[in-house]
């Protein structure tokens, strides 16, 4: 581990001290010694001491095309010098240009956008629209889901650590999620017949009034630990939702904009066309932006008036449009699929070598490892997960974690990484796993 130069440590310590003094304690940081970031470029981040890191978490799946990508940065700088803000009360070329571009890449007839500031707001807008359009109130979400930090977002979430604060559960029910590694029904895929998908139908029939406003799910559950469903899952659920009059909302906050490879949106991997897509994070490569995209017909059913003071501001719209163009021009949907396959093969090899790895899952460049103390019992290994995060940081690699038990590693680098980047990440992961004590 590199020791920072004398004197520079004081800067880092002072930032951490002020963070603890002036920000809410709930604003959590990674690491025993929080990493104070100073700058970043493409796949790398530098801390305030000048230490360089390979970033394989991308600002929580937000840095789609690399930190400070020259094209995105230039568009932001140009727009900031021309028009920064007026609110949605005034149309401008940037907001309509982005909306038109999104209409071109979304599946089916999803051509009408509402822009906000975050994934939380995008999900709020989607649920509100579904209730208005159907005249019904009840919404089905999934266990282990994460849908945002607002009161409705927390209510849709089914992950104890993120639900505290007094959620209002009226009108929200949670179905069993497709967590094959820890099947709550004690079954094994494919012999299970995807019984978890059928639970959605059962839940509607027993815990609702027999019809619903909507079903909302992440194609791959992000905070839940990159839980990835079987191929049949969403097709079965889609039929059930439609049979009971509901709208299908695909929460693409983490899976959208090419993250799962080949396709623009994660739900397309399962050959389902939703009624509403919500997105944020990777849409603008780090600029604050949320979007709720639906059909023109459904958009007309929003009742009353609405605005978004900051949503769809010209600077964020310019960043999002540039991000999409980079993905197209650099063929990053294909690169994500190719590098994801190479990365997955390397992770499978690590699982053969390191007994802590109980499961490898995900798609594209959204890959997860679930760490366990014993593969037979699948006892979660949150302590070892924390140690791995620390060792990886000390070795120069930034990774994420998640999962209900805090034992899942989340790996999500920028979509334009190269084979050499993936190989270096695998080398550093291998080294870091070797430095974590294996449970007796």
Image (tube, rainbow, N blue to C red):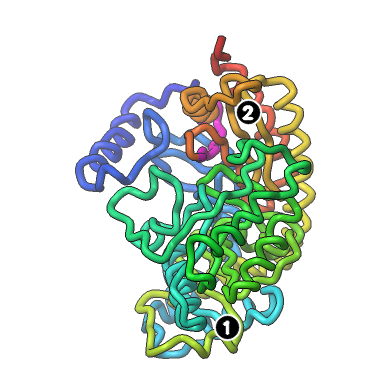
Residue at image point 79% right, 49% down: 338
| Residue lying furthest left | 21
Q: Is residue 218 left or right of residue 85?
A: right
Q: Is residue 394 magenta?
A: yes
Residue at 67 percent across and 74 percent down: it is 106
Look at the picture and state if 134 lies above or below 408: below
Q: Residue at the spot x=42%, y=36% of the render? A: 30
Q: Which residue is mark 2?
A: 429
**Highlighted magenta segment, given as a residue range:** 393-403
Quarter of the figure with the C terminus:
top right
Position of residue 414 in the picture relative to residue 223 (left or right): right
Residue farthest to the top? Answer: 440
Label 2, residues with CA under 10 Å away: few <14, some 14-19, many ≥20: many
Mark 2–mark 1 Cα distance, whole angstroms, equals 42 Å
Who comes first in sequence, dot 2 or dot 1? 1
Give the image location of residue 316, x and y in percent.
48, 71
| Relative image position of residue 15 (x, y in whole percent) | 29, 40
- The residue pinned by badge 1 equals 112
- Give the image location of residue 143, x and y in percent: 51, 50
Viewer-proximal residue, 283 or 301? 301
Dot 1: element: strand
């Amino acid at each position: 581990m590199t020791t920072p130069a004398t004197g520079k440590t004081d800067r880092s310590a002072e930032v951490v001290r002020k963070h603890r003094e002036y920000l809410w304690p709930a604003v959590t940081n990674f690491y025993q010694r929080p990493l104070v970031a100073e700058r970043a470029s493409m796949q790398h981040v530098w801390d305030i001491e000048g230490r360089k890191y390979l970033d394989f978490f991308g600002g929580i799946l937000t840095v789609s095309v690399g930190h400070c990508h020259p094209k995105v940065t230039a568009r932001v700088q140009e727009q900031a010098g021309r028009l920064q803000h007026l609110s949605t009360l005034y149309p401008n070329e940037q907001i309509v240009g982005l909306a038109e571009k999104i209409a071109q890449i979304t599946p089916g007839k999803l051509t009408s956008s509402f822009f906000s500031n975050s994934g939380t707001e995008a999900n709020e807008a989607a649920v509100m629209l579904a209730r208005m359009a159907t005249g019904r109130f009840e919404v089905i979400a999934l266990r282990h889901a994460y849908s945002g930090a607002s009161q409705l977002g927390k209510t849709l979430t089914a992950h104890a650590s993120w639900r505290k604060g007094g959620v209002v559960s009226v009108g929200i029910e949670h179905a069993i999620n497709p967590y094959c590694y820890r099947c709550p029904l004690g079954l094994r895929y494919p012999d299970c017949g995807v019984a978890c998908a059928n639970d959605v139908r059962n839940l509607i029939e027993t815990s609702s009034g027999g019809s619903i406003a909507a079903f909302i799910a992440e194609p791959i559950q992000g905070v839940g630990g990159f839980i990835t469903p079987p191929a049949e899952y969403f097709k079965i659920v889609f039929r059930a939702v439609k049979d009971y009059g509901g709208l299908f909302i695909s929460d693409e906050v983490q899976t959208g904009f090419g993250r799962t490879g080949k396709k623009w949106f994660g739900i397309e991997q399962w050959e389902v066309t939703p009624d509403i897509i919500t997105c944020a994070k990777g849409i603008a490569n780090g600029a604050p932006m949320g979007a709720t995209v639906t059909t023109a017909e459904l958009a007309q059913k929003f009742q009353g008036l609405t605005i978004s003071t900051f949503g769809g501001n010209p600077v964020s719209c310019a960043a999002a449009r540039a991000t999409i163009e980079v993905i197209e021009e650099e063929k990053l949907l294909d690169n994500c699929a190719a590098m994801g396959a190479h990365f997955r093969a390397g992770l499978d090899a690590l699982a053969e070598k390191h007994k802590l790895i109980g499961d490898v899952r995900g798609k594209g460049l959204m890959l997860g490892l679930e760490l366990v103390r014993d593969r037979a019992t699948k006892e979660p290994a949150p302590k070892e997960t924390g140690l791995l995060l620390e060792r990886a940081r000390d070795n120069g690699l930034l990774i994420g974690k998640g999962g209900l038990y805090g034992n899942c590693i989340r790996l999500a680098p920028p979509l334009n990484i190269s084979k050499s980047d993936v190989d270096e990440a695998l080398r550093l992961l291998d080294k870091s796993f070797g430095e974590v004590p294996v449970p007796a």
